[in-house]
Every structure is written in C-alpha cells, then in structure tokens.
Image (cartoon, rainbow, N blue to C red):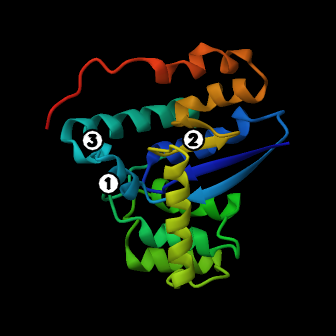
C-alpha cells in the first residue's frame, strides 16, 4: 500500500477539482491518502510569488478555466461571492476536525463544498459557524495546538519542495496540480519513465538567464 499525502488549501479551485478527481485517478491502486491542510499564502510568501488571483488578467483566466474544467469533469463549482478570501478559519477547522490534525475525506469535502458549491461568501462568519457546527470538530479550531499544527503541515510541505496547491507527495516525489493526477497514477503503476532522465535529469539543466528585479 502506498501512502500519499495530499496538500491543499480551500482557497484553491484547482484543489477542489483535484480532490474530486482523486478517487478515479487512484482507482485500483492500493493506497492511503493523508489530507494535510496548508496555507497557500505562506507558500507564496516563501517563494516570493503572487497568487493567480493577484494578477488581474490571470485572475480572470483562472476563474474562467476552473468553471470550464468543472463542466468537463462533471463537478459542481460555483465561484464564491468574493475571491480570494482569508481561508485561515476553514483550514483550522479542518485541522481541528480530528485529534491528529488530519481531516478525513468527509470533513474535507464538506468544507470544500462550503466554498465552491454555493456561490456564497465563504468567509461569512454565520456560514463559517454553521459549517463548524455540522463538522463538530474534536479540537478547538482557535487553540494554539491547532494553529501550530497548520503551521507544521505548511512547513513540512515547503521542506518537501511543495510550492503550490493541490500537491500530492508519494515516495518523496512531488506531483503538483490537478492535471498531474494522470502522472501520479502512472508512477504508482510502476511506469519506468520515473527512474530515467525525464524525471531525474531536470536539475542538471543550466539556468541561462535570471530576471532582474
């Protein structure tokens, strides 16, 4: 059985699409998925990047594309009333849903649906209180322990080379993005490409120029 870690942030529509596509992509493969919420904003800061929604033209494209992908995938997706939003409360709720900080698929899906399936404000305090009540977390989402656990998952992901969400990590290999699921499946099925230069040789490619400023 393969242990796969799924790093995600509820702020990402691609994470929602990837979460929904994951069972089919892994069908027939003996595996166990560990869901670990991470703060995408902290990753962007660590790598010195802007988020897709912080670049106006990219923001518009992203919102168009994810709705198209959802239509193609047959997944319910309605843009929330405001995006981006502060996902901290929802991430902490996910961590708090289980004593070990690893939310199960049910809790993870309920929070994703809260964000991506209603068209409402994901950060509305009353709605967040309602989703928290429905999940009934076993820890206090505002506790120092929960806050530290979220930071730990985020730092763990960064140490593994994770730079965005959604990301799946297995055997130290990082698979980023909803569209990486076929690649992940091929690896898990033993495709020998992953032991060759296509995977292992990329770090030897020289950097020809670096952008200044």
- Which dot marks residue 208? none
- Badge 3, how many Cα within 10 Å: few under 14, some, many 20+? some
Residue identified by numbered label 1: 45
| Residue at 70% from the left image edge and 71% from the top image edge | 100
Residue 74 spot, x, y in % from top left: 58, 36
Residue 43 spot, x, y in % from top left: 40, 52
Q: Quadrant of residue 178?
A: top right
Q: Nearer the viewer, residue 148 or 106?
A: 148
- Badge 1, how many Cα within 10 Å: few under 14, some, many 20+? few
Residue 204 spot, x, y in % from top left: 47, 19
Find the residue positioned furthest to the left. Answer: 213
Residue identified by numbered label 3: 59
Quarter of the figure with the N terminus: top right
Residue 54 located left or right of residue 112:
left
| Residue at 43% from the left image edge and 17% from the top image edge | 205
Q: Nearer the viewer, residue 83 or 88?
A: 88
| SS category of the residue bearing label 3 | helix
Q: Nearer the viewer, residue 53 or 69?
A: 53
Residue 129 visible? The answer is yes
Task: Kindly indicate whether the residue at mark 3 contacts the one at mark 1 (C-beta within 8 angstroms).
Answer: no
- Mark 1 vs mark 3, CA separation in Å: 18 Å
Residue identified by numbered label 2: 18
Q: Earlier in the sequence, mark 1 or mark 3?
A: 1
| Residue at 52% from the left image edge and 72% from the top image edge | 92
Quarter of the figure with the C terminus: top left
- Badge 2, how many Cα within 10 Å: few under 14, some, many 20+? many
- Mark 2 vs mark 3, CA separation in Å: 19 Å
17 lies above or below 209: below
Q: Earlier in the sequence, mark 1 or mark 2?
A: 2
Residue 188 located left or right of residue 156:
right
Task: Kindly indicate whether the residue at mark 3 contacts the one at mark 2 (C-beta within 8 angstroms).
Answer: no
């Amino acid at each position: 059985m393969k242990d796969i870690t799924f790093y995600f942030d509820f702020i990402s529509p691609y994470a929602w699409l990837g979460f929904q596509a994951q069972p089919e992509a892994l069908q027939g493969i003996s595996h166990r998925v560990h869901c670990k919420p991470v703060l995408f904003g902290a990753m962007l800061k660590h790598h010195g990047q802007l988020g897709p929604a912080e670049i106006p033209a990219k923001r518009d494209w992203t919102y168009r594309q994810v709705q198209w992908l959802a239509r193609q995938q047959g997944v319910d997706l309605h843009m929330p009333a405001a995006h981006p939003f502060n996902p901290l409360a929802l991430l902490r709720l996910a961590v708090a849903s289980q004593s070990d900080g690893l939310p199960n698929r049910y809790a993870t899906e309920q929070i994703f649906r809260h964000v991506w399936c209603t068209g409402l404000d994901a950060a509305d305090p009353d709605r967040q209180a309602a989703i928290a009540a429905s999940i009934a977390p076993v820890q206090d989402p505002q506790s120092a322990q929960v806050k530290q656990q979220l930071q730990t998952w985020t730092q763990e992901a960064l140490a593994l080379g994770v730079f965005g969400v959604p990301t799946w990590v297995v055997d130290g290999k990082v698979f980023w993005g909803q569209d990486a699921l076929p690649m992940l499946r091929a690896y898990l099925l033993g495709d020998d490409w992953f032991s060759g230069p296509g995977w292992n040789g990329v770090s030897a490619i020289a950097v020809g120029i670096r952008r200044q400023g």
